[in-house]
Amino acid sequence: MSDLPSSSDAARLVTHLAQARPGRREIIESRELSPEMALLRAFQSQRLATTHADLLAAPRYRPATEFFLNDVYAPRDFSQRDADMLRFYQGVRKVLPERAVSILADVVTLSDLTNELDDQLCRALFETVGVTDAISPQQYAKGYRVCDNYAERVRQIEMIGQIGLGIDRLVHIPFVGVSLRLAHGPAVLTGWEDLQRFLEHGFSAFKHMKGAAEFLETIRQREKAILDRIFAAEPNPFDIHDVR
Protein backbone atom coordinates (compact mmCIF):
# COMPACT_ATOMS: atom_id res chain seq x y z
CA MET A 1 0.00 0.00 0.00
CA SER A 2 1.20 3.52 -0.73
CA ASP A 3 2.34 6.07 1.84
CA LEU A 4 -0.29 7.46 4.18
CA PRO A 5 -2.21 10.39 2.66
CA SER A 6 -1.81 13.81 4.22
CA SER A 7 -4.57 15.65 6.06
CA SER A 8 -5.16 17.85 3.01
CA ASP A 9 -5.31 14.79 0.74
CA ALA A 10 -7.94 13.20 2.95
CA ALA A 11 -9.97 16.39 3.22
CA ARG A 12 -9.98 16.82 -0.56
CA LEU A 13 -11.00 13.18 -0.98
CA VAL A 14 -14.05 13.61 1.23
CA THR A 15 -14.84 17.02 -0.28
CA HIS A 16 -14.94 15.38 -3.71
CA LEU A 17 -17.62 13.02 -2.39
CA ALA A 18 -19.59 15.93 -0.93
CA GLN A 19 -19.48 17.80 -4.25
CA ALA A 20 -20.36 14.79 -6.42
CA ARG A 21 -23.38 15.19 -8.68
CA PRO A 22 -26.07 12.63 -9.51
CA GLY A 23 -25.23 12.83 -13.20
CA ARG A 24 -21.78 11.44 -12.49
CA ARG A 25 -23.22 8.20 -11.17
CA GLU A 26 -24.11 5.08 -13.07
CA ILE A 27 -27.55 4.12 -11.79
CA ILE A 28 -27.76 0.37 -11.26
CA GLU A 29 -31.20 -1.19 -11.50
CA SER A 30 -32.22 -2.38 -8.05
CA ARG A 31 -32.46 -6.14 -7.92
CA GLU A 32 -32.51 -8.95 -5.44
CA LEU A 33 -29.76 -11.52 -5.26
CA SER A 34 -30.56 -14.77 -6.98
CA PRO A 35 -31.91 -17.39 -4.55
CA GLU A 36 -28.68 -19.35 -4.99
CA MET A 37 -26.41 -16.38 -4.26
CA ALA A 38 -28.58 -15.27 -1.34
CA LEU A 39 -28.28 -18.76 0.16
CA LEU A 40 -24.51 -18.78 -0.31
CA ARG A 41 -23.97 -15.36 1.22
CA ALA A 42 -26.29 -16.11 4.13
CA PHE A 43 -24.24 -19.24 4.83
CA GLN A 44 -20.99 -17.30 4.60
CA SER A 45 -22.22 -14.53 6.88
CA GLN A 46 -23.39 -17.03 9.50
CA ARG A 47 -20.15 -19.00 9.22
CA LEU A 48 -18.10 -15.86 9.79
CA ALA A 49 -20.26 -14.88 12.77
CA THR A 50 -19.71 -18.33 14.28
CA THR A 51 -15.97 -18.46 13.60
CA HIS A 52 -15.43 -14.98 15.05
CA ALA A 53 -18.09 -15.09 17.77
CA ASP A 54 -15.56 -14.00 20.38
CA LEU A 55 -14.72 -10.86 18.38
CA LEU A 56 -18.41 -10.15 17.95
CA ALA A 57 -18.87 -10.43 21.72
CA ALA A 58 -15.92 -8.18 22.58
CA PRO A 59 -16.95 -4.51 23.04
CA ARG A 60 -13.71 -3.32 21.45
CA TYR A 61 -14.10 -5.42 18.30
CA ARG A 62 -17.88 -5.72 17.92
CA PRO A 63 -18.39 -2.69 15.60
CA ALA A 64 -15.63 -3.81 13.22
CA THR A 65 -16.92 -7.39 13.19
CA GLU A 66 -20.44 -6.15 12.50
CA PHE A 67 -19.06 -3.95 9.71
CA PHE A 68 -17.65 -7.01 7.96
CA LEU A 69 -20.82 -9.03 8.54
CA ASN A 70 -23.32 -6.32 7.58
CA ASP A 71 -21.48 -4.10 5.07
CA VAL A 72 -19.13 -6.54 3.35
CA TYR A 73 -20.46 -10.10 3.52
CA ALA A 74 -24.19 -9.64 4.12
CA PRO A 75 -26.64 -11.50 1.83
CA ARG A 76 -27.61 -8.28 0.04
CA ASP A 77 -27.05 -6.80 -3.40
CA PHE A 78 -24.23 -4.24 -3.23
CA SER A 79 -24.18 -3.50 -6.97
CA GLN A 80 -25.03 0.20 -6.62
CA ARG A 81 -22.49 0.80 -3.88
CA ASP A 82 -19.79 -1.07 -5.79
CA ALA A 83 -20.55 0.90 -8.96
CA ASP A 84 -20.45 4.16 -7.00
CA MET A 85 -17.13 3.17 -5.43
CA LEU A 86 -15.60 2.48 -8.85
CA ARG A 87 -16.97 5.72 -10.34
CA PHE A 88 -15.79 7.73 -7.34
CA TYR A 89 -12.32 6.19 -7.54
CA GLN A 90 -12.07 6.88 -11.27
CA GLY A 91 -12.90 10.53 -10.57
CA VAL A 92 -10.63 11.22 -7.62
CA ARG A 93 -7.56 9.44 -8.99
CA LYS A 94 -7.37 12.15 -11.66
CA VAL A 95 -7.07 14.96 -9.14
CA LEU A 96 -5.40 13.41 -6.07
CA PRO A 97 -2.06 11.67 -5.54
CA GLU A 98 -2.01 7.87 -5.45
CA ARG A 99 -1.32 7.81 -1.72
CA ALA A 100 -4.71 9.43 -1.14
CA VAL A 101 -6.75 6.96 -3.18
CA SER A 102 -4.83 3.70 -2.78
CA ILE A 103 -7.30 2.37 -0.19
CA LEU A 104 -10.20 3.03 -2.57
CA ALA A 105 -8.32 1.22 -5.33
CA ASP A 106 -7.78 -1.77 -3.05
CA VAL A 107 -11.44 -1.82 -1.99
CA VAL A 108 -12.56 -1.81 -5.64
CA THR A 109 -10.13 -4.63 -6.43
CA LEU A 110 -11.24 -6.68 -3.42
CA SER A 111 -14.91 -6.18 -4.27
CA ASP A 112 -14.35 -7.39 -7.83
CA LEU A 113 -12.33 -10.38 -6.61
CA THR A 114 -14.93 -11.33 -3.99
CA ASN A 115 -17.79 -11.13 -6.50
CA GLU A 116 -15.85 -13.28 -8.96
CA LEU A 117 -15.01 -15.89 -6.31
CA ASP A 118 -18.60 -15.97 -5.07
CA ASP A 119 -19.90 -16.46 -8.61
CA GLN A 120 -17.50 -19.36 -9.15
CA LEU A 121 -18.38 -20.95 -5.83
CA CYS A 122 -22.12 -20.54 -6.40
CA ARG A 123 -21.91 -22.33 -9.74
CA ALA A 124 -19.81 -25.11 -8.24
CA LEU A 125 -22.21 -25.65 -5.34
CA PHE A 126 -25.40 -25.77 -7.39
CA GLU A 127 -24.12 -27.29 -10.64
CA THR A 128 -21.49 -29.75 -9.41
CA VAL A 129 -21.81 -30.39 -5.69
CA GLY A 130 -25.58 -30.80 -5.79
CA VAL A 131 -26.75 -28.15 -3.33
CA THR A 132 -30.50 -27.50 -3.46
CA ASP A 133 -32.11 -25.54 -0.62
CA ALA A 134 -29.43 -25.68 2.10
CA ILE A 135 -25.64 -25.67 2.26
CA SER A 136 -23.77 -27.94 4.66
CA PRO A 137 -20.20 -27.18 5.81
CA GLN A 138 -19.01 -30.27 3.93
CA GLN A 139 -20.71 -29.15 0.70
CA TYR A 140 -19.29 -25.66 1.08
CA ALA A 141 -15.77 -27.06 1.51
CA LYS A 142 -16.22 -29.35 -1.49
CA GLY A 143 -17.30 -26.36 -3.56
CA TYR A 144 -14.04 -24.62 -2.67
CA ARG A 145 -12.04 -27.63 -3.86
CA VAL A 146 -14.07 -27.85 -7.08
CA CYS A 147 -13.19 -24.20 -7.82
CA ASP A 148 -9.51 -24.99 -7.19
CA ASN A 149 -8.53 -21.36 -6.68
CA TYR A 150 -6.40 -21.51 -3.56
CA ALA A 151 -4.08 -18.68 -4.64
CA GLU A 152 -6.99 -16.32 -5.27
CA ARG A 153 -8.50 -17.16 -1.87
CA VAL A 154 -5.19 -16.42 -0.17
CA ARG A 155 -5.05 -13.11 -2.01
CA GLN A 156 -8.57 -12.30 -0.80
CA ILE A 157 -7.59 -12.94 2.83
CA GLU A 158 -4.41 -10.90 2.53
CA MET A 159 -6.22 -7.98 0.88
CA ILE A 160 -8.73 -7.81 3.73
CA GLY A 161 -5.84 -7.34 6.16
CA GLN A 162 -4.11 -4.83 3.89
CA ILE A 163 -7.21 -2.69 3.52
CA GLY A 164 -7.96 -2.92 7.23
CA LEU A 165 -4.50 -1.67 8.14
CA GLY A 166 -4.91 1.17 5.66
CA ILE A 167 -8.20 2.22 7.24
CA ASP A 168 -6.64 1.92 10.69
CA ARG A 169 -3.92 4.36 9.66
CA LEU A 170 -6.44 6.66 8.01
CA VAL A 171 -8.53 7.13 11.16
CA HIS A 172 -5.56 8.80 12.85
CA ILE A 173 -5.31 11.59 10.27
CA PRO A 174 -6.67 14.87 11.69
CA PHE A 175 -9.99 16.15 10.34
CA VAL A 176 -10.88 13.01 8.34
CA GLY A 177 -13.77 12.14 10.65
CA VAL A 178 -15.07 15.70 10.65
CA SER A 179 -14.79 15.94 6.86
CA LEU A 180 -16.63 12.65 6.45
CA ARG A 181 -19.47 13.84 8.68
CA LEU A 182 -19.71 17.11 6.76
CA ALA A 183 -20.01 15.14 3.52
CA HIS A 184 -23.02 13.18 4.81
CA GLY A 185 -25.78 15.63 3.87
CA PRO A 186 -24.51 16.49 0.38
CA ALA A 187 -23.75 12.83 -0.36
CA VAL A 188 -27.29 11.78 0.55
CA LEU A 189 -28.86 14.64 -1.41
CA THR A 190 -26.90 13.74 -4.54
CA GLY A 191 -27.62 10.01 -4.32
CA TRP A 192 -24.34 8.66 -2.96
CA GLU A 193 -25.85 7.47 0.33
CA ASP A 194 -24.85 3.79 -0.06
CA LEU A 195 -21.21 4.67 -0.51
CA GLN A 196 -21.33 7.35 2.20
CA ARG A 197 -22.89 4.91 4.67
CA PHE A 198 -20.23 2.30 3.87
CA LEU A 199 -17.41 4.81 4.44
CA GLU A 200 -18.96 6.10 7.67
CA HIS A 201 -19.52 2.63 9.11
CA GLY A 202 -16.00 1.49 8.29
CA PHE A 203 -14.37 4.64 9.65
CA SER A 204 -16.41 4.57 12.87
CA ALA A 205 -15.78 0.87 13.49
CA PHE A 206 -12.02 1.14 13.07
CA LYS A 207 -11.76 4.34 15.07
CA HIS A 208 -13.64 2.64 17.91
CA MET A 209 -11.03 -0.16 18.07
CA LYS A 210 -8.14 2.21 18.79
CA GLY A 211 -5.78 -0.14 16.99
CA ALA A 212 -6.77 -2.86 14.54
CA ALA A 213 -3.58 -4.92 14.15
CA GLU A 214 -4.53 -7.70 16.58
CA PHE A 215 -8.10 -7.89 15.23
CA LEU A 216 -6.93 -8.15 11.63
CA GLU A 217 -4.19 -10.67 12.40
CA THR A 218 -6.67 -12.85 14.29
CA ILE A 219 -9.00 -12.88 11.30
CA ARG A 220 -6.13 -13.55 8.89
CA GLN A 221 -4.81 -16.50 10.88
CA ARG A 222 -8.23 -18.07 11.34
CA GLU A 223 -9.34 -17.66 7.74
CA LYS A 224 -6.01 -18.96 6.42
CA ALA A 225 -6.23 -21.97 8.76
CA ILE A 226 -9.76 -22.72 7.53
CA LEU A 227 -8.67 -22.36 3.90
CA ASP A 228 -5.78 -24.78 4.43
CA ARG A 229 -8.05 -27.28 6.18
CA ILE A 230 -10.58 -27.08 3.35
CA PHE A 231 -7.98 -27.82 0.70
CA ALA A 232 -6.54 -30.61 2.85
CA ALA A 233 -10.05 -32.15 2.84
CA GLU A 234 -10.28 -32.10 6.63
CA PRO A 235 -13.68 -33.49 7.73
CA ASN A 236 -14.45 -30.47 9.94
CA PRO A 237 -12.54 -27.58 8.34
CA PHE A 238 -14.19 -24.87 10.43
CA ASP A 239 -13.18 -26.43 13.75
CA ILE A 240 -10.20 -24.21 14.57
CA HIS A 241 -10.62 -23.50 18.27
CA ASP A 242 -6.87 -23.73 18.79
CA VAL A 243 -6.13 -20.81 16.42
CA ARG A 244 -5.73 -17.48 18.29
Image: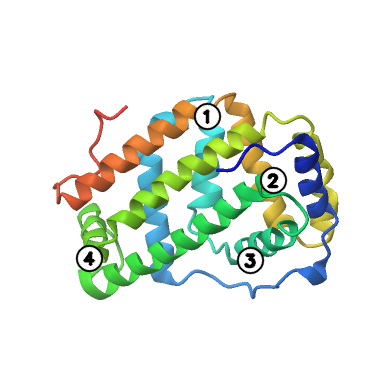
- Label 1–label 2 contact, CB within 8 A: no
- SS class, disc 3: helix
The amino acid at mark 1 is Ala
Residue linked to disc 3: 83
Distance in Å between CA atoms under marks 1 and 2 = 20 Å
The amino acid at mark 2 is Ala
The amino acid at mark 4 is Val
The amino acid at mark 3 is Ala
- According to the image, what is the colour scheme of the structure? rainbow
Residue linked to disc 1: 212
Left or right of 120 on screen, residue 2: right
Distance in Å between CA atoms under marks 3 and 4 = 30 Å
Neighbours of disc 3 within 10 Å: few (<14), some (14-19), many (20+): some
- SS class, disc 2: helix
- Label 3–label 1 contact, CB within 8 A: no
Left or right of 26 on screen, residue 208: left
Toward which corner of the image does residue 81 lie, by quadrant?
bottom right
Distance in Å between CA atoms under marks 2 and 4 = 39 Å
Residue linked to disc 2: 100
